[in-house]
Structures are given as C-alpha cells and as structure tokens.
Amino acid sequence: MNYKVNGPLLAAFICLLLFLTALYAPALRFGLIWDDPEWYMQAVGKSTSQLLFPSTQYQYYRPWLMIYNHQFIKADGTIAIYLLHWAQIGWYLLNLTLIFGISRKVGFDRWAAFMVVVLSALHPFVYQAIAWEAPSQPIMAVFLNTAWVLYLVGRERSRTSIFVLSAFCFLIAMGLNETAVALAAIPLLLEIALRLQKSRWQDILKSWRHPWQNGWGWTGVYLIMAVLFTVIWLVIPRENGVVGLFWDVRVYAYMLQGFVLAFASSALVRGTIHEWSLIGMWGLLIVALWGLALYRKRGTLATIGLIWAFLAIAPGLIGLPFDYISIASRMFYTAVPGVAWLWVSALWPAPQARWSATAVLGAALLIGMALFGLVTTIGFGGLYSKGINHLAEMVDTLADKNGSYLFVNFPDRYHLKEEPLAVGYWGLTLAPVVVDLDEFPALLHGSDAQTISRSMPWLDETSRAEGPYHVDMRGVITPPNELYQLAAAQEGIYVTRYDTAGNFSLHYAGALSKGNDENCGTAVFDNTICLQDIQLTPAGDELIIRTTWWTSEPLPEHLTLYTHLAQPGLPPAAQADGDSWQGALPLANWQPGDLILDERRLPLPPAGSDWRISLGVYNWVTGARLTAVDNQERPLPDNAFVIPIEQ
C-alpha cells in the first residue's frame, strides 16, 4: 500500500484539526462541572504509590487515571484546570490521527479514511467527552488506538519489541478505564481483515490449528490480559454504586441511535415512542448499510466496524442502568470509529464510479451525516455554555471570600425541552446537590467560603416555562420566612435569575443583619419603613443600586419596592421593581429591628444628561405609593426619594 504524503489530503487534515481546535476552544473556560470537585480531590495529598491501590470511595478501579489526574494538582491543592482542558482537546485530536492511520492500514483509501476521521470527529456523542475534562475516554482511546497501530506496525516488521510496546499500551488503557477490556478482540479482527485481503476463509481457519506459528499468538495476548484485568477488577474493594448487571431496553435504544445519528433525530421519529419500535427501525437501517457494504465488496471492513462499535458499548449495555447511561453520551466515544467504518464502507464512492448517481447520493448522505453531527455538536456547545458560564460566575464571585453564603435557585441540572435525539437526557448536570457549591472555588482558587443552597421555584417560573430548558434547582424548597432565618447566619445572599432565552444570571441580592439605628438616615415611608442608606456604584455598563432598609413594625402583605431610572418629567427608562433580595423576600417577612440590605442593577445611562434614581414603596395590588418624607419629615414629591446620578 502506498503511504506517500498527499498534499491536498495533508492540507485538508490540518484544516480539520485547526477547525476542531477552534470548535472546542470555548471549553477551555468551562472549568469544573458536575461532581468534579469530589473526583479530583481523590488525588489531592496522595503519593503515586497510594494512587495505585483501589479506593473504597470510588466505584471503579482506574489507577493510571488517578496518577494522571494527580499531575494536574498544584502544590497548594488547587487544580490546573486550563491545562487539563487543553490536554483533553489534545487527546481528542491525537486520537483522530490514530484512527486515520488504522483506517489506512486495513484498506481504506486516503479520502475514505479522511471521511472516517470527519465522521468520528463530528459525532455529537463525543462532545461530552471532550468539553468536560473529567471523562477518561479520550486518553483511554489514544492508548487503545496506539496499541492497535503498534500491533499493525509490529505485524509488518515482525518485531517482538513493537508487539510488547503495543501490549503495554493496552495495559495502560485498561488502567485508565476498565471498558478497554471489551476491545481486546480488535487485534484479532484486524488480523482477520488483513488476511482476507490475500487469503480465503478456509485458509484462515486452517491456520488456527497452529496459532503461534502462524502469527495468531499476539492476538491472544490481549484477550488474556483483558481476562486477568477483569478478574482483578471484579475482586478488588470498591464503592458500591451503579455498576451491576442490567437489562433495560432504553439503554439499547440510547446506544443504537449513535449508529444512525440523523435518522435518530427527535424531529424525524416524533410520535414513535416505544423503544422497541425505534430499535426495529434503526436496526433495519444498520442491516441495510451492512448489506450495501457487502454488495460493494467492503463487507469485511463494515463487519469489523460493527463489531468494534458493539464491543465498545457492551460494558454500558450490560453493566450500567439507564439513569446513568441517559446522561453519559461519553460512553459511546470508543465506538465512534466503528460506526464511521460502517457508513464509509457502505456509502463511499467506488474509484471506478465516482460520479455515478449512486456515488453522488452516497457522498451526499455522508456529508449530511457530518453536517448533522456538526450542527448538533454546536448546539451542545451552546447548551453547555449557558450553565457553565453561570457556574464560573459563582466560582469567580467566591474566589477571594470566606464566611458563609446562601444561594437561591442555583441550577442543579437542566435539559432541552426540544431534544435533538430520540432517547436520553440531552442536558447538563451542572452542580449536583451531592457537591457543595463552595467545593468548586475551593479546588480552583483555594477559597475558604462555605455555601448553602435553597430553591424558591415560584421565582421566574413563567420565564422558565417559556424558555428552552427544563431546570432542576439545588436545595429544598424554602418559603420566605425560613429563608429569612437562614440569612441571619450568612454573609450574603445570591439569587439565580432566568429569562425566556434560557440565560442564567447570578445576582448578589443582599444580606440581613440584626440591629438598626432608631433614627432614619434618608427617607421614611408610611411612618414605618425606613430607607436608611443608598449607594450608587457604576460597574461596566450597569449601575449598582445598593439600599439598606428597616421597619419599625411588622408590615402587611402586598407591599413592594420600586427603583426607577428616569429624567425629570419623563417616564422611567429602566426600572427594577419587586420584593427585596431579587424577589425572594417579600416585605411582609421583614422583622422589626433588622437591617435589610438589598441590591439591584439598572443600565448605566449615557453621560451628560440629568438622570436620576427614584426609590419608594407601593402596594402592588392597588398601585398606590406609600407616603414618603425625608429625614427632616418634609414630604417628598411623588412619594419617592430621588438621588441624582453623578457622572
């Protein structure tokens, strides 16, 4: 086979790698997500030898992965997160290069092998494994595919040392992720594929009578290693968890859709709700592709691709429940090359008929599959960015703080209402309740802050209902009176707000402190409510309005605050009306003797105009404002306290 460098192909490959780097570059700012703090803290403060032994606090035995993670823990106990993300992207790109090499060596021509790489690169099921730095699939796949490349090279050169190095890479792969054992048969499949190019099945079967003499010995080494590692993995102590033996048709439907992608679009199969119906339709399509590959005399490659893919997903099919699989598209990562082999074997144009109608149709289908994968991947990127940027905002907020802080309505997980694929949970577990929010800034910045999470689902309920996501929020549902009691022991309260576009925004809402000055500093409303202090602070393109209030007696229901930005004689240009603490604390819950710190934000007005902030209290049922006087008991015009904006 001619492996001379092809200029256009090399240029296309480099452009692809650069494009993929740009596609995943936004993931560099994703930081930690999910249960990352607990995962990476397992490597903090341990020696390399300690990491080689199993942990009863982890469901798996992955010693090499633990040692790998340990390399990114700094001396101060924080983690080099950006380097981790770069490494994840690097493993992904390196893996694509190895897939190309394997594809070429088993018989795909240059551009067919390149299409295998394109389909592998843009398969949307790989997004989670790359954008999230914790999954072990990319690095495990690199060592697996390196093992297969070395096996093929060792076979060509008849070098025992290369076979030994290949087996060592396979050993590393198993120690990175135990699912590698399922792919131990790949060398055997590759050997069969290569021999079928020169021999008949009958001759191959006869050669098994003396396997070592006839070159089959090394294919069995990987199988023996896999069996031994499996035995060790089964008997060592681990945390009891999700691993077991399961039979759930939804798991099979979830995995099978990864073989057919665009044909598993939720828009295409809407109305087909039974998993067996989906499996039947997709199974027929897979058989049709395999049959077409047979017809085009590429049956061996298509068959190996199918077996490769099913071996890769076998641990998930039998060992994990649907609740786990449905949020774990990364489990499909090592199956992607096999799926790409099937599609390219079936549809790639034959050299002698590149411009026939069937060739053009096949190429169009392959390009369509790649475009569907690209569009879905970009969609996943937007989905992840919304929540992860919000989590990063929280991390930055607490980076240099200590004390305790209360977070209200922070998202735990969220998923798309209009899901792209038929089966599964297409969303993101952002910050699960099993992990305290303070663990994220602690591992990234060494923060000493502590956090408490609570939910008040009635806040922004309409916006979430009209938005693109179903959102599960952290913490038990807490009424305002209980929130008030909790706030007394906190340094501050932060509230997550939601809009109809699906954006999450974190707002410092205020704080609560005991004791107040009996003399009101600024304005009094209805002889009861005191506006003690007001501070205006520009921040970028926003104006922060921080106010301090107290009441001399319990307040009735239906009272709320207003904050308007306006010019004299004109309607408000912007306003922030509503209950204190971003709507979480109605005024009826204020207790006499306490200071209520409340913060709101409005757009910063343009300079050079007479802009003013007006504040007051009104009854939101009747719309009537409470009477207002200043601290000298002089009536205030329009029952509003007005402060000019100095610019």
Image (cartoon, rainbow, N blue to C red):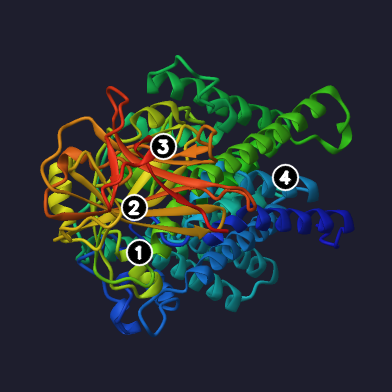
The residue under the point 55% across, 57% down is: 27
Q: CA distance from mark 2 to mark 4?
A: 37 Å
Could you say where residue 241 lies in the image, as x and y percent from the top left?
A: 22, 52
Q: Residues within 10 Å of mark 4 (few under 14, many from 20)?
A: many
What's the amino acid at mark 4? Met
In primary-sequence order, the first of circles 2 and 3 is 3
Q: Which residue is mark 4?
A: 115
What's the amino acid at mark 2? Ala
Q: Nearer the viewer, residue 530 or 549?
A: 530
Q: CA distance from mark 2 to mark 3?
A: 13 Å
The residue under the point 21% across, 63% down is: 238
Q: Which residue is mark 3?
A: 415
Left or right: 111 with respect to 424? Answer: right
Q: Residues within 10 Å of mark 1 (few under 14, many from 20)?
A: many
Nearer the camera: disc 2 or disc 4: 2
Left or right: 329 with respect to 146? Answer: left
- Mark 1 and mark 2 in contact? Answer it, CB < 8 Å: yes
Q: CA distance from mark 4 to mark 3?
A: 31 Å
Q: Which residue is mark 2?
A: 431
Mark seen at residue 13: none
Q: CA distance from mark 4 to mark 1?
A: 40 Å
Could you say where residue 393 lies in the image, as x and y percent from the top left?
A: 44, 57
Indicate the quadrant where residue 481 lies.
top left
Q: Which residue is mark 1?
A: 440
Q: Is residue 321 visible?
A: no
Left or right: 566 with respect to 15? Answer: left
